[in-house]
């Protein structure tokens, strides 16, 4: 026989050989392709790293450039040079920033490199960089970015110092030149270390990038070698595999040929032995047939024996097929002589087409199949005569070899007689149970009805009791003797006696003596009149002795058997009585009020007016009622005012304001009015009330007071110069007198004169400042403020005074405050100066004063700066803190004697700061010192200060002569003298300014200004006014510039005047 | 036979899909969450020791960028990156907190400025301020622009009223406290004003600290803060709390930070 399985296996073996060969070639090709792509990628990585190194190289070069430019920038002598180097530095900084951005985030850097001397011949290189590891941080880039920001700050810092130095060189202010040079020297010490550190970071980054290049080169070489080895191994592996597989193939072919030869030999042998085998097999089959015939005869005998037994039974015996329900066997009792075999069991027993079903008539066969065990059921079989017969059926399963139920044995026994007896007994028991249930239902119904009736009765009683107990009126029942028979619980809350306590007592016991007799008469009348009710009013005494007013209603119910007495309903009317009294009081207030009161309805029609209204307006009350308040309206009143009034009060709000009204006689008057809506209980407006006061005289008095105040300020301002000049003369000549050979006594007198004059001048200056602050002309300028300069100016004045008193003076300016701010440095300096002056005054020798200027907050546009003056002086007690800011007041009267002063400093400072919207904060401890501070919000200055350009002045002698209004020859001599004297005065003023004697300089400028004003030289007036104002604000640099300009103009006027004089006018 | 075919197919698939020819070289993803910590130069030794301990315990990676306190603050403000800042000058952390950059901060102790001179104090310098203005003394102070020590020195000297004189006399302004210390150790300067805690640092070899005798030199709080830019908040907050714990503080005390 040929094996069909083996050729299939050989065929598959051959197919797998082909697949293996194909797979080998594919793997080698894939490996080669992978190597090529990997090497291309590594080359791109190499380019990336090289670009990174190039970018770091550019950064290094640019840092060096910035360093060089910064040194050139420091050496700049002109603004143009400064601007040039500054722009180059910022270009480089911006480029570095851009390059760091590419290194940090990846991207393309476009670099233009010059290829010839022409600035337009530039070759553009693109450096693309991709950052592969975005998860980690490149700390060198982070560090360099911060350095770059610091570099910007350094350049900005130099910028302000350079501008200061150049401005100082122009104005020959050597102090400022020295200060700027010193600042720049310090900065230069800083930047060397800074650039070294910056270069170190960039060098480190560059070297790291070069090291990466080397590493990548090594890596590429190593990868190349690695792939060569892999390719070799793959070729060897697959070559060897194919060779081995080929050997296997040869072996298989040899094996197939050998198998075919053996199969041929086996076929020949089988054909020769076939006849011999057939004969021996026939003999064996005949022998087995004889054995079967003998066995069948034995089985037949046994069947007949069992059949006889079953037919002798007196009950039905069936064997039924489990699938078809057909009777396979039935004994004689069951068949009753008929042939019932192959009929269904249900057709034989019930004459039905379908098998038995349901709980009452279950099919035993189905039950046997389900339970796979014997079952017993009862069936009722209806007989042909219509009677029912009861059968007990016992069923047993018959299993085949595999355990399946194939047949059922059924034995059916007639139990009809026994069933009839059992049914009779059950019917008797059911009848008895029904009768007992009927009796129980009737009893329950009667019980439920009784309970409902009792509950309803109880609820009604409870409701009435609660009603009586919760009413606020007192219910009392008196018996025929007048004793209290019943009192409701409200007796306790109203009178204070509990109902149990008062029961059995007389009601007269709680009625005061004055009402008792009247009550007795009243109650007797109730008792006598019989049916009907009667009301009365009397007082009752509460338990604590307090008397209340009560209203009572009495009903005689003696005839009613359930009550049997007089029922009194008593109500407390005290609150109502009090309210009536209050109403009367209010009515009197309205009548006697010193202000006019009007009540109108919602349309504005007057419903009520008090007598004062009549007195003020001249309209009678009866006359006014029914009219609208517009009868008082002045003809020129603003209609907008009344629109606003109605909008306000109709929306439920209160309106306050003033009216210009006219009286009945046409006289005008001004009223201050408050008009408010009156709302009802539900919140709707029901009336309006107006309370009005005639303020005509009050306004006139206020106007007079304000005019007097302005006149006072003007007077003080006007006489300031007149008083200060002689005082300065006294002080000046005292100094002159001192060196004229006086004796000791005279020197003592002179010292007293000088000290008194100085004190007087200080007090007067204080008064002047106070008047200045309070005057209408007070204004706040907005100029560029340098806080360092402000601090220096203020310190210069007070440091010396402090050191003279042996007081340590410390000053600190927060470095974080921008150097250029906008504000009024003079006014702020004035406020700080007053605080410092006080600190010096009230600090004992050996003490310490600190003047700190600190940054509090900063926004994009503003900076809040705190000025703090801290001293270790005498301090202020908590009681005196509230008065120290009042004018001419000091913390202690002994202070004035001990330290002197007029007590104006704090008042002036507070008033100045009030104009800035600021206030002085004080922290003090008596005996330990004080800290005064205030906060000013400055605007940030956008622009740098640059020297101002001096405008060219045009002068016309004729116009000037016309302005002066004198004869031309007089004008020539007058003008020449004026110009010479004024120039001399102004030069002195400039010298005084340089020496720090601002007050003297101001006096000189002021005298020139007065003379120029008298001569009406308009071309000078404005400049002299500015010089005077800025000298007052300590802006010496600008004043000096102005003085220079004014002297130039004076020279021009003088030359022009002389020229005209020489040419005969 | 089937087994051999399966092996070949598996090898082919893993080779084709498992390897990409464009995998960047040297990029080793260790699976650690990396955080960036800014540290003042004066605190770098303590922070380094803490970071090593925390890396072992938590599995987080920590990169430390050291420098002057003011420079570190600027690095945070400009780069808007990083997780934690440790500053010798607590004001730096407070300013960053006011501007909303620091979300959680801790005080770790205090420090104060001192003179650093060559070991043995050959010039017999004491704690008086006048040494800074002596013309024969080569003094170095920190730059207020980059260094926390420099900023504090400026404030104190300005209060004392000798800032300008000290500037005039100084031979240079160092960018951070390590550079200040190095200038004395390398004998480039006779006197440097630096943090007292650095006397416990290995970098202070060859130097000696002298307390400054002046009321203007105050005690400064050392603080640390969590930055709002933190990408690995769990690691960063964990490290910050670790540094502020008793164990962390012990490390700072070991390196000279006052309680």
Image: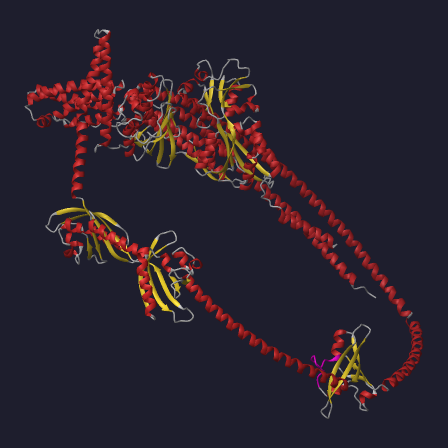
**Taking B171 as reference, is A641 left or right?**
left
Q: Position of residue A698 (x, y in %)?
A: 18, 41
The furthest residue to the front: A481
On-image quarter of the C terminus of chain A: top left
Image quadrant assignment for residue B25? top right
A945 or A530: which is nearer to us? A530
Q: Is residue A292 visible?
A: yes
- Residue visible at 22% across and 12% down? A750
Whether residue A307 is situated above or below residue B11 in the rendered picture: below
- Residue visible at 82% across and 65% down? A2
Q: Position of residue A905 (x, y in %)?
A: 28, 26
- Residue visible at 20% across and 11% down? A737
Q: Is residue B147 visible?
A: no
Does the stretch in magenta take in A282?
A: no
The furthest residue to the bottom: A385
Q: Position of residue A701 (x, y in %)?
A: 17, 39
A675 or A1032: which is nearer to us? A675
Q: Which residues are magenta?
A: A353-364
**Taking A45 as reference, is A705 left or right?**
left
**Number of numbered discs present?**
0
**Taking B226 as reference, is A912 left or right?**
left
On-image quarter of the N terminus of chain A: bottom right
Does the stretch in magenta take in A359?
A: yes
A459 or A618: which is nearer to us? A459
Q: Position of residue A695 (x, y in %)?
A: 18, 44
Q: Magenta region's main secondary structure?
A: loop
Whether residue B204 is situated above or below residue A674 in the rendered picture: above
């Amino acid at each position: 026989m040929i094996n069909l399985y083996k050729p299939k296996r050989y065929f598959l073996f051959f197919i797998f050989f082909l697949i293996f060969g194909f797979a080998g070639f594919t793997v080698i090709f894939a490996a080669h392709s992978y190597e090529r792509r990997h090497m291309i990628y590594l080359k791109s990585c190499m380019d990336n790293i090289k670009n990174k190194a190039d970018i770091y190289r550019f950064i290094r070069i640019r840092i060096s450039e910035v360093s060089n430019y910064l040194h050139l920038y420091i050496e700049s002598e002109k603004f143009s040079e400064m601007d040039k180097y500054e722009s180059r530095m910022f270009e480089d900084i911006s480029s570095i920033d851009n390059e760091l951005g590419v290194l940090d985030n990846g991207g393309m850097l476009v670099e233009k490199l010059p290829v010839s001397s022409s600035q337009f011949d530039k070759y553009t290189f693109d450096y693309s960089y991709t950052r592969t590891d975005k998860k980690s941080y490149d700390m060198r880039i982070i560090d360099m970015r911060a350095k770059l920001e610091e570099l910007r700050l350094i350049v900005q810092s130099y910028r302000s110092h350079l501008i200061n130095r150049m401005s100082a060189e122009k104005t020959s202010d050597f102090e400022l030149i020295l200060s700027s040079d010193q600042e720049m020297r310090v900065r230069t010490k800083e930047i060397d270390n800074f650039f070294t550190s910056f270069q170190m970071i960039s060098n480190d980054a560059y070297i790291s990038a070069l090291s990466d290049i080397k590493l990548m080169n090594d890596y590429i070489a190593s990868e190349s070698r690695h792939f060569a080895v892999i390719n070799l191994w793959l070729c060897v592996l697959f070559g060897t595999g194919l060779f081995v597989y080929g050997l296997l193939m040869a072996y298989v072919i040899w094996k197939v040929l050998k198998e075919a030869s053996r199969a041929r030999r086996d076929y020949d042998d089988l054909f020769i032995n076939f006849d011999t085998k057939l004969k021996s097999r026939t003999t064996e089959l005949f022998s087995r047939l004889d054995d079967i015939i003998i066995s069948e005869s034995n089985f037949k005998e046994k069947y007949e024996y069992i059949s006889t037994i079953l037919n002798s039974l007196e009950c039905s015996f069936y064997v039924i097929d489990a699938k078809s329900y057909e009777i396979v066997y039935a004994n004689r009792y069951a068949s009753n002589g008929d042939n019932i075999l192959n009929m269904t069991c249900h057709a034989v027993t019930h004459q039905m087409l379908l098998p038995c079903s349901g709980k009452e008539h279950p099919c035993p066969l189905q039950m046997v199949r389900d339970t796979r065990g014997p079952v017993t059921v009862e069936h009722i079989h209806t007989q042909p005569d219509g009677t029912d017969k009861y059968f007990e059926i016992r069923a047993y399963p018959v299993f085949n070899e595999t355990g399946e139920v194939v047949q059922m044995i059924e034995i059916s026994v007639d139990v009809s007689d026994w069933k009839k007896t059992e049914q009779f007994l059950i019917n008797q028991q059911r009848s008895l149970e029904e009768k007992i249930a009927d009796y129980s239902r009737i009893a329950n119904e009667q019980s439920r009805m009784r309970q409902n009736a009792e509950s309803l009765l109880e609820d009604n009683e409870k409701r009435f009791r609660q009603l009586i107990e919760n009413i606020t009126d007192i219910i009392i029942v008196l018996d025929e003797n007048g004793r209290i028979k019943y009192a409701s619980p409200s007796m306790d809350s109203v009178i204070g006696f509990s109902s149990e306590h008062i029961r059995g007592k007389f009601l007269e016991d709680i009625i005061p003596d004055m009402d008792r007799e009247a009550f007795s008469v009243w109650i007797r009348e109730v008792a006598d009149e019989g049916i009907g009710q009667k009301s009365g009013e009397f007082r009752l005494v509460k338990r604590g002795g307090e008397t209340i007013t009560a209203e009572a209603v009495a009903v005689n119910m003696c005839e009613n058997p359930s009550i049997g007495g007089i029922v009194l309903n008593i109500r407390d009317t005290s609150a109502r009585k009090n309210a009536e009294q209050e109403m009367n009081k209010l009515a009197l207030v309205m009548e006697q009020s010193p202000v006019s009161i009007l009540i109108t309805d919602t349309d504005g029609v007057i419903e009520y007016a008090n007598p004062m209204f009549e007195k003020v307006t001249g309209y009678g009350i009866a006359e006014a009622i029914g009219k609208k308040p517009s009868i008082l309206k002045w003809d020129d009143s603003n209609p907008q005012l009344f629109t606003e009034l109605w909008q306000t009060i109709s929306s439920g709000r209160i309106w306050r304001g003033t009216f210009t009204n006219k009286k009945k006689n046409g006289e005008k008057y001004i009223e201050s009015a408050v008009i408010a809506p009156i709302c009802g209980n539900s919140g709707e407006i029901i009336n309006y009330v107006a309370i009005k006061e005639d303020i005509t005289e009050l306004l006139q008095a206020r106007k007079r007071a304000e005019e007097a105040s302005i006149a006072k300020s003007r007077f003080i301002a006007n006489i300031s110069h007149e008083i200060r000049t002689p005082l300065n003369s006294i002080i000046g000549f005292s100094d002159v007198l001192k060196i004229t050979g006086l004796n000791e006594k005279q020197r003592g007198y002179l010292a007293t004169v000088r000290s008194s004059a100085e004190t007087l001048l200080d007090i007067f200056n204080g008064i002047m400042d106070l008047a200045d602050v309070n005057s209408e002309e007070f204004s706040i300028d907005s100029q560029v403020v340098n806080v360092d300069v402000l601090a220096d100016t203020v310190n210069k004045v007070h440091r010396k005074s402090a050191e003279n008193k042996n007081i340590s003076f410390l000053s600190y300016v927060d470095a974080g405050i921008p150097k250029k701010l906008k504000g009024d440095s003079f006014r702020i300096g004035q406020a700080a100066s007053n605080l410092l002056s006080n600190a010096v005054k009230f600090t004992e020798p050996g003490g310490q004063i600190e003047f700190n200027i600190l940054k509090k907050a900063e926004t994009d546009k503003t900076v809040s700066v705190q000025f703090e003056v801290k001293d270790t002086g005498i301090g202020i007690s908590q009681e005196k803190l509230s008065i120290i800011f009042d004018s001419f007041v000091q913390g202690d009267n002994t202070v004035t004697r001990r330290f002197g002063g007029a007590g104006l400093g704090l008042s002036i400072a507070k008033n100045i700061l009030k104009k800035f919207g600021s206030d002085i904060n004080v922290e003090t401890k008596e005996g330990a010192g004080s800290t005064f501070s205030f906060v000013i919000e400055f605007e940030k200055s956008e622009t740098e200060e640059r020297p101002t350009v001096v405008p060219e002045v045009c002068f016309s002698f004729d116009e000037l002569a016309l302005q002066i209004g004198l004869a031309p020859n007089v004008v020539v001599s007058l003008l020449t003298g004026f110009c010479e004297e004024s120039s001399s005065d102004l030069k002195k003023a400039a010298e005084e300014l340089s020496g720090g004697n601002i007050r003297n300089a101001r006096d000189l400028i002021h005298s020139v200004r007065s003379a120029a004003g008298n001569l009406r030289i308009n071309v000078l007036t404005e400049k002299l006014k500015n010089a005077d104002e800025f000298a007052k604000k300590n802006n010496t640099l600008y004043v000096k510039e102005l003085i220079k300009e004014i002297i130039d103009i004076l020279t021009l006027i003088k030359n022009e005047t002389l020229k005209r004089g020489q040419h005969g006018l | 036979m089937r087994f051999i075919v399966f092996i070949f197919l598996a090898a082919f698939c893993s080779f084709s899909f498992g390897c990409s020819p464009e995998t960047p070289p040297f990029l080793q993803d260790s699976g650690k969450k990396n955080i960036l910590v800014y540290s003042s130069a004066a605190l770098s030794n303590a922070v380094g020791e803490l970071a090593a301990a925390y890396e072992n315990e938590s599995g987080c990676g920590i990169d430390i960028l050291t420098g002057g306190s003011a420079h570190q603050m600027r690095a945070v403000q400009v780069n808007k990156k990083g997780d934690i800042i440790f500053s010798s000058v607590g004001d730096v952390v407070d300013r960053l907190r006011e501007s909303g950059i620091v979300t959680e901060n801790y005080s770790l102790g205090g420090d104060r400025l001192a003179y650093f001179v060559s070991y043995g104090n050959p010039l017999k310098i004491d704690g008086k301020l006048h040494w800074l203005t002596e013309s024969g003394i080569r003094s170095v102070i920190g730059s207020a622009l980059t260094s926390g020590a420099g900023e504090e020195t400026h404030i104190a000297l300005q209060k004392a009223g000798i800032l300008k004189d000290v500037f005039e006399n100084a031979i240079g302004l160092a960018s951070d406290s390590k550079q200040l210390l190095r200038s004395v150790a390398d004998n480039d300067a006779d006197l440097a004003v630096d943090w007292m805690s650095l006397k416990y640092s290995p970098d202070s070899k060859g130097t000696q600290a002298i307390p400054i005798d002046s009321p203007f030199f105050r005690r400064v709080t050392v603080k640390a803060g969590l930055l709002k830019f933190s990408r690995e908040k769990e690691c960063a907050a964990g490290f910050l709390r670790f540094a502020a714990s008793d164990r962390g503080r012990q490390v700072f005390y070991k390196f000279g930070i006052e309680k």
